[in-house]
Amino acid sequence: MSERVNSNLNRLGRGLAVMGLLAALHGGAQAQAQEAAPLFIGGVQASSLGGYAYAGLIKPFAGARLGEGWFQRSVASMLTYRYDTTLQGSTRSVHARAPGLEYAIGRAWSGERSSLELSAGIGLRYTRLSPVDPGSDVRGTHWAFTPQLIARQAFTQSVDADVLASYSAGPNSRYVRARLGARPAALGWRVGVESTLSSGESYRQVGVGLFGARSLASGLSLELSAGRLRARDGSEEPYIALGVAKSM
């Protein structure tokens, strides 16, 4: 293993040790409280420009509950994208595949009409390029420190908005999604419009689409969305996404 990867792993280990200590201290302070059930999360977004798939678990610490208090989140993910570059004097399309693992600790607050969630995660992502791009800095294994914010605000009983924003230091990537939704009583779904931004060192995608979300009686929540993505080179392609969450 290269010296660079070893250094990244050492930094990751130190970060996880600090986060684990914080979790242990908090858990010890709440040892007498009942633990809340964890939440499974998963989803996939697909497009010819690239995609993203993830599966993970959100577990509140003792004394907390989903949406209120301290929590930990573990996620495995796969990021794919493509970009154009010059290789051996000709323009080539490079395809990237980047599996990753992340562990995060966060705090959630909820009120009558709004909620806020802040978290910070540390993880590893391995990026493989095909064909190999010798000039790319994203190849191989990289550590990432990822702060994330999720905020929701209800304007009326049926109209609300939410935003999700994250930045990964290390790979220098970011993701932002903003939604404006409504809950028509006759539908039973939250429906609305969404806008997304996903970018890194070699790619940038801006999306606009529609979404629908519904919570079922079984404890399962379902999200569907579809729209169009615009890449950095101006090309546009449709996308479709599915997300699920289930209390365990």
Image: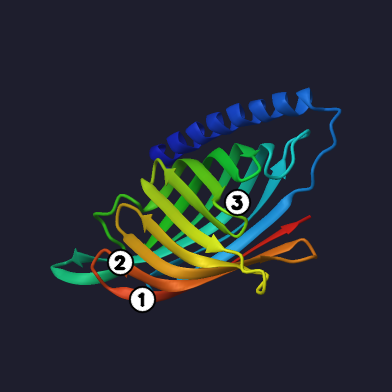
Mark 3: amino acid:
Val
Mark 2: amino acid:
Ala
* Residue 16 locus on image (x, y percent): 58, 33
Residue 18 in the image: above or below residue 124? above
Identity of the residue drawn at 83% across and 27% down: 31
Identity of the residue drawn at 79% across and 55% down: 248
Which residue is label 3 attached to?
75
Q: Nearer the viewer, residue 107 or 104?
A: 107
User: Callout 1: few (<14), some (14-19), or many (20+) C-alpha neighbours within 10 Å?
Assistant: some
Work out whether residue 241 can be spotted. no
**Label 3, label 1: how many angstroms apart (C-alpha)?**
27 Å
Disc with the residue nearer the chain's start (2 vs 1): 2
Which residue is label 2 attached to?
231
Is label 3 or label 1 in front? 1
Which residue is label 1 attached to?
237
Horizontal side of 137 relative to 106 (left or right) equals left
Residue 174 in the image: above or below residue 82? above
Mark 1: amino acid:
Glu
